[in-house]
Image (spheres, rainbow, N blue to C red):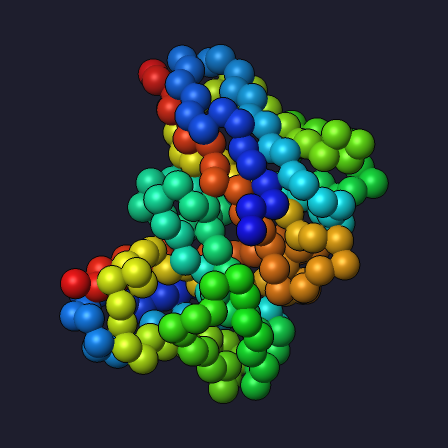
Amino acid sequence: NAGVTQTPKFRVLKTGQSMTLLCAQDMNHEYMYWYRQDPGMGLRLIHYSVGEGTTAKGEVPDGYNVSRLKKQNFLLGLESAAPSQTSVYFCASSYGRVWDTEAFFGQGTRLTVV
Amino acid sequence: SQQGEEDPQALSIQEGENATMNCSYKTSINNLQWYRQNSGRGLVHLILIRSNEREKHSGRLRVTLDTSKKSSSLLITASRAADTASYFCATDVYGGSQGNLIFGKGTKLSVKP
């Protein structure tokens, strides 16, 4: 009964490096989301997907790309990491529209860009 | 764009006391949700209240919604040390993107044994 699993849990990147964060859910949810959480800022939506093969921009999409090739996976990519992308990243999924149903969150990925 | 704002930012109480947190938002909503986040962990859904509901209960949790004042409150009764966490309200924007659930900055609750 895994729910939403994020890998990796911690990562340190040098400025300019690239990486991919993987989110996997085993609940057959249609909707998946990537948020970032910064101190004193709450959670902000980066990108989301309403189904396999679809993606859409959220509130803070610049510097990130996403893909949803399989229903159960939602990947978040950083092509050229910047210190401003130091944050804790959370993936979430929901059965229906996120404002209408419960969202399930992963444990987070703590990313530091130096 | 901050839709919801929790108040107070931090709250410290003794075990057994009640804890009340408030959330105010700016625009019309469909629903409002409350989430809990333990330190270093992901968010856990607590309760969803729809815009046509005024009050909802779940165990020791009581949530109220006043759409005329654009505010909600979360009451935790008979608090326990395990309730120590940050609590967030989250709303959509009526007529807005189906992908966007907007979180407040949270109330940090500390329950002392």
Provide residue B107's location: percent of width, then percent of height: 47, 32
Nearer to us in this view, A97 or A65: A65
Image location of residue A108, percent across then percent down: 35, 57
Lateral position of residue B29 relative to residue A37, left or right: right
- Total numbered badges shown on the rendered structure: 0
Residue under the image location 45 percent in, 28 percent down: B9
Name the residue: 76% across, 59% down. B95
Residue at 56% across, 51% down: B1
> B80 left or right of B56?
left
Residue B85 position, x and y percent, is: 40, 34
| Residue drawn at 40 percent across, 13 percent down | B14
The foreground one among B18 and B2 is B2
Towards the viewer: B5 or A3: B5
Q: Is any atom of residue A29 visible in this view?
A: no
- Is residue B1 shown above or below B11? below
- Residue furthest right in the image: B52
The answer to which image quadrant residue A99 occupies is: bottom right
Identify the image quadrant of residue A109. Answer: bottom left
Q: Is residue A34 above or below residue B56?
A: below
Residue A13, located in which quarter of the rendered image?
A: bottom left
**Quarter of the image with the C terminus of chain B in it:** top left
Residue B86 at x, y percent in the picture: 43, 36
Instruction: Please say whether residue A102 is visible from this viewpoint.
Output: yes
Q: Is residue A107 left or right of residue B92?
A: left
Above or below residue B8? Residue A60 is below
